[in-house]
Amino acid sequence: MCLLARREGITTLFMKPITTRETFMDTQKLKAAVEDLIAKVVGGNALDAFDRYYADDVTMQENEQPPRVGKAACRAFEEDFLSKIKAVRTYVCDGYVISDSKAYIVYRIDADHADWGTLKMSEVAIQEWSNGKVVREKFVY
């Protein structure tokens, strides 16, 4: 079963899981969690989203870099990264897709970072969810 939603002129597709496993969230619950996470992130509350929605054994990865493992290590990276943002001109979500236990979120970013310089890019956050938490996330940009 497919569910479609429109947001800012973009059609988003939600796929209902074909199989049911204990680790899969109900599609509507996952949709609500993803939308809340996105609202927190683009609203400047990324660490609140992290604390609420990321599993203790989460892994996070930038492109093909080695993944960070564990909630403490991932949060430390996020805290450091966010503390070095000097200016934000744009940070929006252009849309997302949910399929089974995965969410694909597209962010558009225009910001200045102390270490990374000017960030003007689109980024896709590929998330795998289990039991209401993100267990794996890879950023592709």
Image: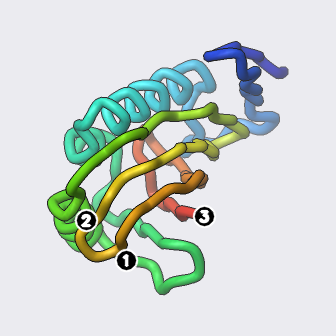
Whole-number angstrom distance, CA of label 2 to CA of label 1: 14 Å
The local secondary structure at tag 2 comes to helix
The amino acid type, in three-letter code, at marker 1 is Arg
Going 55% across and 55% down the picture, which residue do you hit? Answer: 121
The residue lying furthest to the bottom in this view is 66
Residue that numbered label 1 is attached to = 68
Contact check, label 2 and label 1, Cβ < 8 Å: no
| Nearest to the observer: residue 25 or residue 86 | 86
Using the image, determine if residue 57 lies above or below residue 105.
Answer: below
Above/below status of 2 relative to 132 = above
Residue pictured at 58% horizontal, 26% vertical: 26
Residue drawn at the location 49% of the way across and 61% of the way down: 136
Of the two numbered discs 1 and 3 on the same chain, state the one appearing first in sequence. 1
Q: Position of residue 13 (x, y in %)?
A: 76, 26
Of residue 5 and residue 113, the one placed in the foreground of this image is 113
Upstream in sequence: badge 3 or badge 2: 2
Which percent across, then down, holds residue 18? 81, 35
> How far apart are the alpha carbons under marks 1 and 3?
15 Å
| Residue 48 place in picture, x, y as percent | 21, 40
Q: Do residues under tags 3 and 2 come within 8 Å of each other at their CB atoms?
A: no
Disc 1 packing (10 Å; few <14; some 14–19; many ≥20) = some
Frontmost of labels 2 and 1 is 2
Which residue does the numbered mark 2 point to in the structure image? 81
- The amino acid type, in three-letter code, at marker 2 is Phe
Mark 3: secondary structure: strand
Marked residue nearer the N-terminal end (2 or 1): 1
Q: Position of residue 10 (x, y in %)?
A: 72, 22
135 above or below 29?
below
| Element under disc 1 | strand
Neighbourhood count class around disc 3 (C-alpha, 10 Å): few under 14, some 14–19, many 20 upward: some
Determine which residue is flagged by label 3.
140
